[in-house]
Image (cartoon, helix red, strand yellow):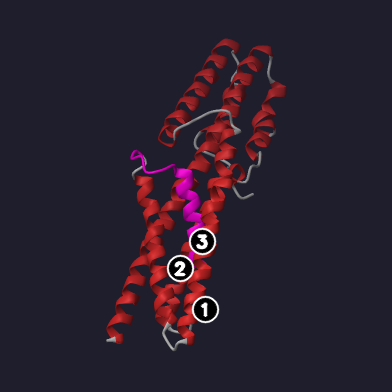
Amino acid sequence: MIRRSSLPFIAIALATFVLVAWYSRVTWLQLGNPAIITGYTLFALMLSLGFFNMRKRLSMVPVGRSSLWLAFHVAAGFLAIALFWLHTGTVWPTGSYERVLAILFYLVSLTGIFGYIILRALPRRLTQTGIEVMYERIPAELGEIREKVETLTLECTEKSGSDTVAQHYIGTLNWFFRRPRFGFSHLVGGDAAGHWLRGPGSAARRYLNDVEKEYFDQILELGALKTQVDRHYACQDLMKKWLLVHVPLSMAVILVSAWHLLLVNVYAL
């Protein structure tokens, strides 16, 4: 669903494309070179899109809400795709150099679309967990949960005089608590972690006495908490690592485009 804040940017993008396409047509009819108009417009648009990354790095500076910058970035991104096709006159150019530029441009576009999808979907998924965890704090949070589970396991062994819970922890639960698990399931909104806890993770409960069950239920509660932390890790990790692909590709496209403009102007002299 399109947000209201995006409508002005979409309207401006459409108007810009119509204006550039019309002016290119007029230039062509007058025996001019419309590629100059579309090329410089596209390059200027690429530079403006690059400013969005600078805006994210300067989030403490009051230069407008990030949601408005995102709306501008999305509208400008789709405008860039349309201008690219208008500039090249085809989806896939013929020259080797042009194909390299096209590959980089399409990779940036695809990673941008992918990023927009996850930035819309994953924050909502994190809100549903009911907890807030900073990405940098996640390893410490998982370590604290694991320590609590191991403490409960030792206390259970001492109080009950049975090592059933300890054996189950060593043989089964330790795998789950050692590191984040079921990352793909968390990303797509699945409940593989919950199914595992209710299945293999709880398999030993039927063999426990009342004292052991009390401790074991506390361990399972910590397991449920860990699934929420794991979801934060999976989603936040993807949102951060996506930028490590999209931003370098964006810089590469700008650099290659700048070189392309330089060559065009040199050979035009």
**In terms of depth relative to the viewer, which is nearer, 69 or 231?**
69
Q: Residues within 10 Å of mark 2 (few under 14, many from 20)?
A: many
Q: Quadrant of the C terminus?
A: bottom left
Name which quarter of the figure residue 63 lies in. Answer: top left
Find the magenta span and give its range: 60-82
Residue at image position (51%, 57%) is 75
**What separation in Å lies between label 3 and label 2 (alpha carbons)?**
18 Å
Q: Amino acid at mark 2?
A: Phe
Secondary structure of the residue carrying numbered label 1: loop
Q: Amino acid at mark 3?
A: Ala
The numbered mark at residue 92 is: 1
Can the viewer see residue 108 in this picture? Answer: yes
Residue at image position (72%, 23%) is 206
Q: Is residue 197 left or right of residue 258?
A: right
**Residue named by callout 3:** 13
Q: Earlier in the sequence, mark 3 or mark 2?
A: 3
**What separation in Å lies between label 1 and label 2 (alpha carbons)?**
11 Å
Marks 3 & 1, CB-CB < 8 Å contact: no
Q: Amino acid at mark 1?
A: Trp
**Residue named by callout 2:** 105
Secondary structure of the residue carrying numbered label 2: helix
Q: Earlier in the sequence, mark 1 or mark 2?
A: 1
Name which quarter of the figure residue 100 lies in. Answer: bottom left
